Image (cartoon, rainbow, N blue to C red):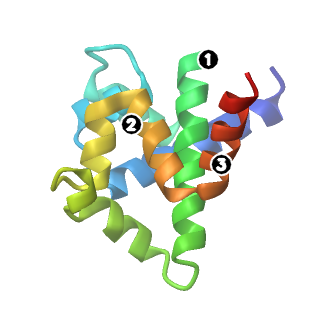
Amino acid sequence: MSDTQQEDRLDLTKTIMSVVDSWGLNARQTVALLGLPDGTPTRALRRYRDDTPFPDSEDVKARLEHICGIIDALRTTYPHNPSMGVLWMRQKNQRFDLQAPAQWVADRGFDGLVAMRAHLDCSFDWFNDKKASDH
């Protein structure tokens, strides 16, 4: 892997960790949301914030793709105030069983990420419905 690819992976890791931290998830929820192995120690999460990229597994990559999609959908939903996306993810919401959306996603893992992305991004939801109906 080239130095540039490694730097890109590290930048993505730091960005995702910053976003997940802003959503108010605890260490256990963060590990579950990112698909990291059970029992991943808090110090490993600290390393991801500082100098270690996420594992290069297909599951983690898929989760990161959905988290990036959620981030982008929140950015387009609240284009003039980026802090509103964070606030929306942290506030209890009737649509999500009176849980904060971040909590709801963390409790449901990969399926929660896909459902949240579909809820926030109508083009993603439409594309997936279209793919499913084509089969």
| Residue, disc 1 | 58
Residue 18 against residue 39 in the figure, above or below: below
x and y, in percent, of residue 48 in the image: 46, 34
Quadrant in the rendering for residue 58: top right
Element type at mark 3: helix
Q: Earlier in the sequence, mark 1 or mark 2?
A: 1
Q: Which mark is residue 126?
A: 3
Three-letter amino acid code at disc 1? Glu
| Residue, disc 2 | 112
Q: In the displayed orientation, state which residue is furthest to the left.
A: 98
Question: Is residue 89 rendered to the left or right of residue 6?
Answer: left
Three-letter amino acid code at disc 2? Gly
Three-letter amino acid code at disc 3? Trp
| Residue 135, visible in the rendered structure | yes
Q: Earlier in the sequence, mark 2 or mark 3?
A: 2
Question: Which residue does the image show at 27% across and 29% down from the upper left?
Answer: 42
